[in-house]
Amino acid sequence: MSDGDRSYLLPHVVAKLANMELRARLVVEGFIAGLHRSPYHGFSVEFAEHRPYMPGDEIRHVDWKVYARTDRYTIKQYEEETNLKSYLVLDTSRSMAFASAGRISKLEYASYLAASLAYMMVKQSDAVGLALFDETVTTYLPPRASRAYLQQIHAALQNARAAARTEAARSMHLVAERITRRGLVIVLSDLMDEPERILTALKHFRHKKNEVIVMHVLDPLERTFAFGDDATFRDMETDERMTTQPWHIRRAYAEAMHAFTERYKRECREHHIDYVLLDTATPFDTALTGYLSKRERLL
């Protein structure tokens, strides 16, 4: 794949593609092309459908066609032989619909990223599941590793809409209760709820012996508050409006936002939760590298 094809790591380019399956495939292919030219080339990104024969394996599972071509004994990989179970937990509450001028929304960014992660996981013979939540858990697909199941996950992400109000902490507790087999939990959210409640929910995942990655998705303007001279702000969930001159409060806002993200970063680290801060202009390889690094440590 050429360097030009790596443009599929850019969110505004991915948004122009026809469907979620195509977006996921091209993001992952662009990511792998980049890995081959980067310091991360040591990561295991071989998408094997087979594994080497080991003493004790049943002969009936040997792929004789592969043996005929390579003179090597390999075993067909079945769903129950997956390496890792992962759960993608995606926030679809109304605040995720926000998008500043020229950007995709936080929900679009997070759904494209989730689709790409799911694609990569299944290609690596990992099982992946999906939970969508707003005020409650609206979709729950338990982890599986088949390509047909991946299509269900992509369809759910394609149809995801930001609608109801945020109850992120409550909903994450509900997801944690539905996870019966421990694995890797990846939360994709703007975390627009009381930090104390969110952190308690994240610790619930850890209490059940899961590994956790938090992908904190914001819009660039939410991080910088770089609005013009006059602006009207509308609460995405209550529709309350306020007109002001942003430069009056920019410094105070920047300090509050820094404290907000730093608290998540600090407390996640204290509880052995990986924290990745993203905005909707961040190329997708930043998040995919964070996932791959975590997977390497787990296997």
Image: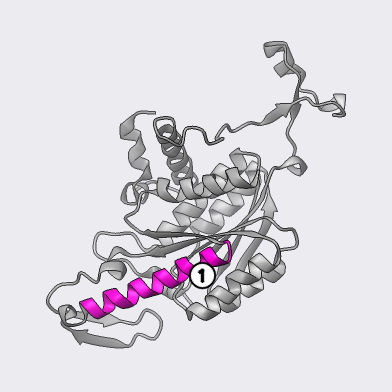
Q: Is residue 239 highlighted in magenta?
A: no
Tell me the residue that label 1 is attached to.
267
* Residue 282 screen position, x and y as percent: 34, 53
Which residue corresponds to the image point at 35% horizontal and 37% vertical from the top-left? Answer: 6
Q: In this view, does 107 lie to the left or right of 254?
A: right
Q: Main secondary structure of the magenta part?
A: helix
- Quick one: 204 or 162, which is closer to the camera? 204
Residue 38 appears anywhere in the view:
yes
Q: In terms of secondary structure, where does tag 1 sit?
A: helix
State which region is magenta: 251-272
- Quick one: 270 or 299, which is closer to the camera? 270
Q: Quadrant of the N terminus?
A: top left
* Residue 114 screen position, x and y as percent: 51, 54
Residue 54's place in the image compared with 193, above or below, is above
All told, the count of numbered labels is: 1
* Residue 152 screen position, x and y as percent: 60, 52
